Image (cartoon, helix red, strand yellow):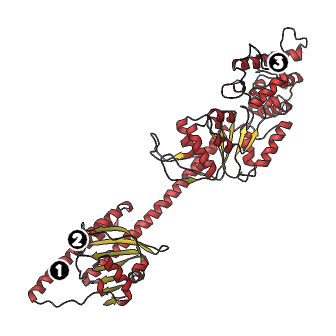
Amino acid sequence: MSSARDQIVLAAPSRPDEEGSDERGSNDERGSNEEHFEDLLTALALSLVNVEPHALDALLVASLRRIVRLLGVDRSALGRYDMPLGQLFATHTWALPEVEPVPSPIAEREIPFISAQVRAGHGVICDRVKALPPEAATDRASLQRLGLRSIAVLPLAAAGDVLGWLSFGALRQDHLWSRDQVRRLRLLAGVFANALLRQRKDLELDAAMAENLALRQRVEAENAVWREQVLHCHDFDELVGESQALRRVLTQVEQVAPTDSTVLILGETGTGKDLIATAVHQRSRRAERPLIRVNCAALPATLIESELFGHEKGAFTGAISRKIGRFEVADGGTLVLDEIGELPLELQAKLLRVLQSGEFERLGSTTPRKTDTRVIASTNRDLLAMAREGGFRPDLFYRLGVFPITVPPLRERKEDIALLSAYFIDRLRTKLGRQVTHIPDAVLAALMQYDWPGNVRELENVVERSMILSPGRSLQLEGLPCPAKQGATAAVSDPAGGDWRTLSEVERDHIQSVCARCGWRISGAGNAAERLGMHPNTLRSRMRKLGIVRPVGPDAV
């Protein structure tokens, strides 16, 4: 056995040749092989200098094949260590067709001597496995069990670190490793190690660049969403009013905002559900993170999944690049799902999964992603009725309805109309270039008598239209629907009434007509409450106030 600082050579003593001619022939053959080996080593070194990271693996396997055939051995492998598991894994292998490839993984306890030597940066060269020293008894038994007769194992060392190992093995006959072969194999191991080190650094750089790109895409997506929110945000940023109904809602907001519970905001169109969602977010611990909105009714079913969860490039026709979904953009913040009742059934299961586990996948990907997003949903639909009729998943309804908040319609908080009107006048005065500062009593009385089916949004529109048509400092009311406007005029200007009908009479007749057409069914899709744009409980309360009773007898439906 001979040794050096960076390798150990274990070889049986060479046998003297019996005839000089045989010795000359053997030397000539050996010299020819060494020249071929030198040429191969040069070619491999050149091919590995600038190889692309994705092409290196195939090139390494091809290199192992050429070396095995040139050396006349049976198989070869490149591998790495797994420190926690104490195992050696073969990452690149090649073997002759009739030979089994190098087994993988191999426990270090099966070859402790060889493993320790290679970890220390030394090579182990053995012409005959049975010639291994006594301290390598375990290694000898393991190698013989695998059918190995000769081995060469060298460290893959680069930049002062041992990255793995390179091995060659002969199973059919002993192989005598010459000094020139060992020297060239050491050079080859260095070439492989440097190529693997470059590949690792290139892959790390690619991963860092991909992470940077993903971060940039997320920032761009957040900026785009925030710009969208600014362009489409409500014109007022606070809730105006002092009614008991509004105070009750604000109390609920204060109670739920500091938690991470899902909130379901119910109410008719135009009541300010988006303002309640904003108030919840602004009073939460997520106030410094994004508040993202998605209108489930404004997007086609084919696009809403991509909008919520994102998609990979090529996930569908037209997906020319990766898109980050709103759940990723809202990570750490709040996602508001407006008109949740319009969400397609096939997507409701995916939304339920996100609510329960915080996991989702982009379209075109099977990689689960995590999100820490608080969800606030809003709707003017009766989700419970939809769940009973199969239009909405009951499990999703109960998961969303952890903390429901019902925003009252304007007709149930009429004491706030004067404050809201004054607020809109003050805010619109500069925008419209008007000097309106006064609301006449007759105008306010008309505003108070109207039931506002469009709620606060309709009031804002009426005030703006009236201001445009008001040249002086007093508001001249314009824009109320004719029946309501006539009823209001009769009450203010002509108490006798004449042929005028009161607003209550008009309202009672209209509700009776709609209920009769719906067979006196109040709740459910397409029935009286939905057609009137009211919550079923609100409609029942209004019917009791107006004295509307479902008919009985032969005329009843």
C-alpha separation, residue under disc 1 versus residue under disc 3: 114 Å
State if disc 3 and disc 2 touch (CB < 8 Å). Answer: no
Looking at the rendered structure, the kind of residue marked 3 is Leu
Looking at the rendered structure, the kind of residue marked 2 is Arg
Q: Quadrant of the N terminus?
A: bottom left
Mark drawn on residue 503: 3
* Apparent side of residue 209 relative to residue 426 in the rendered image (left or right): left
Say few, some or many: other residues with alpha carbon within 10 Å of mark 2 (under 14 / 14 to 19 / 20 or more).
few
Residue sitting at 10 percent across and 89 percent down?
20
* Apparent side of residue 269 relative to residue 321 in the rendered image (left or right): right
Counting from the top left corner in percent of width and height, residue 295 is at: 63, 37
Q: Which residue is the site of mark 2? A: 69
Q: Which residue is the site of mark 1? A: 31
**Does dot 3 land on a helix, a strand or a loop?**
helix
Counting from the top left corner in percent of width and height, residue 465 is at: 75, 25
State if disc 3 and disc 1 touch (CB < 8 Å). Answer: no
C-alpha separation, residue under disc 2 versus residue under disc 1: 16 Å
Residue sitting at 83 percent across and 24 percent down?
544
Looking at the rendered structure, the kind of residue marked 1 is Gly
Foreground pick, 30 / 98: 98
Q: Which sits earlier in the primary sequence, circle 2 or circle 3?
A: 2
| 361 to 176, vertically: above or below | above
**Disc number lying in front (1 or 3):** 3
